[in-house]
Image: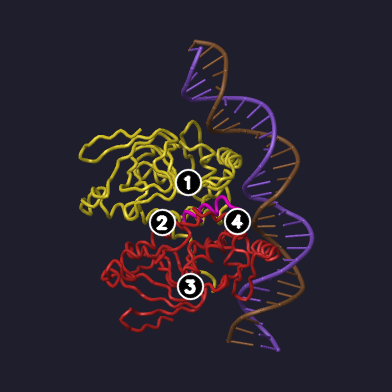
Chain colours: A yellow, B red, C purple, D brown
Amino acid sequence: MTQETNRPTGPVCMFRRHDYLARAGETKDCVLRIEDGWAAQYRLLPDGRRQIITLFLPGDYCEPQWLLQGRATLPIVALTRVRARVLPHGRIQARAPHEEDSTIRVLDAMLTLLRNREKWIFNLGRMTATERLCNLLCELHARLKARNRVIQDRCAMPLTQYDLADIVGISPVHVNRVLQTLRGEGLLDLKGRWMQVRDLMALQRLGEVSGDAAGPNVPQAA
Amino acid sequence: MTQETNRPTGPVCMFRRHDYLARAGETKDCVLRIEDGWAAQYRLLPDGRRQIITLFLPGDYCEPQWLLQGRATLPIVALTRVRARVLPHGRIQARAPHEEDSTIRVLDAMLTLLRNREKWIFNLGRMTATERLCNLLCELHARLKARNRVIQDRCAMPLTQYDLADIVGISPVHVNRVLQTLRGEGLLDLKGRWMQVRDLMALQRLGEVSGDAAGPNVPQAA
DNA sequence: CGTTTGTTTGAAATAACTCAACGGGAGTGG
DNA sequence: CCACTCCCGTTGAGTTATTTCAAACAAACG
């Protein structure tokens, strides 16, 4: 499961679907960079309720804060086959600021994570099921696009409807119904682990996706 | 609004209720340490939906990530009269690691913020209205207790039911009804800006505050 | 004191959930 | 290659948690 090679870029880990990249409470002296595959950090209640907290896509640093505090708080599971590069703290600190995997780059990823959580707290607290789903799909599309993994608005979508439900905080059955509607309105196609976005603008409008995370903030009435 | 003094510990800011500690997009070359009062970071949609993302209590660093990235993403508003100490980056970096307001302490607060958001993403995604409210009240109690601001399970509660609603992501009317129930069952008293917790254990049980979950909840132990 | 801000209550509407069952498709093993 | 699972997606019907609207009341404020 953890085959390592020792090329100058650092060792690589492989995980099969459902393997753990981390378990709750584990000590970590490295950061992972996902090279391929998707992983999710989640929290589970004894009664079975599950919420996915963070989604890691190709190109993401998996738990950049491990650089500052080497301890996993929640389990991280592979949603697909995953290939990840292991970046020991020493290797990160040795990099010059402008280089790949430098301290600044990793800390920057941590700040991005912090801001993305702002967005999701808003989504979960104040958006409807449809809005949340559209917003999520737009986010996935944008993140994959930034990593050159979208071709003509078509990209991978390995998440099951159960996964989607546990991200947007609704029931799997309801995810299904909302997706039906979106398909019915010609906004996207979703089948066989692939997503074809047919009307990105409409999807963004439905998902209240503004240009910037800070976009839809108008001063509060005094 | 921003009266400053220049004692060796650093300048102090005062804010009245509804004053802004920060506005979206503003550049920041300092971190604030709240000495007294409560403040909230929120996001607002044009249609009026508001979600409070972060609550800052006495003793909290307000936006510790400003140390790494000097830019506010969302507005921060004073919920009460607030007194805050201004900590310019230079002053923080000059501190020895074990001292108050050192780089490590501030970064630690940032990690705590990150972990607290994990908890709230879970709460908003998977908990019922009652659970969320109980969880919030337990969190407030614990955080204030860690700052020595709880006497015999009695502490300040300056949040209106509208504020509470915007934190736990439900409607103000429903907040009211849930609070009624909790009062009716003798779990707490809530009146005149003060909260008297009568049965903390029961409140924690209702709020699914597990020992494990409680870990990340509690703010940075100084 | 009058005005604003916050709380309480009732009744009707609805978004989302649960339960339950069926169907398809992708692997897996014979 | 077929048959058998098992996982995943789909659909329907009935239920429930939470919302919205509206109005009255209380409390804080200047």
Locate residue B34, reporting x and y percent: 43, 73
| In front: label 2 or label 3 | 3
- Pointer 3 chain: B
- Residue pointed to by mark 4: B205
Q: Residue at x 52, y 50 (%)?
A: A207
Element type at mark 4 = helix
Mark 4–mark 1 Cα distance, whole angstroms, equals 21 Å
Say which residue label 1 marks: A42
State the CA–CA distance, disc 4 to disc 3.
23 Å
The residue at which mark 2 appears reads as: A114
Residue B121, magenta (yes or no): yes
Where's the N terminus of chain A, which quadrant? Answer: top left
Distance CA(mark 2)–CA(mark 3): 28 Å
Which residue is denoted by mark 3 in the rendering? B148
**Label annotation for residue A207:** none
Which stretch is magenta? B117-129
Answer whether residue A14 is visible to the viewer in this image.
yes
Residue occupying image coordinates x 48% and y 46%:
A42
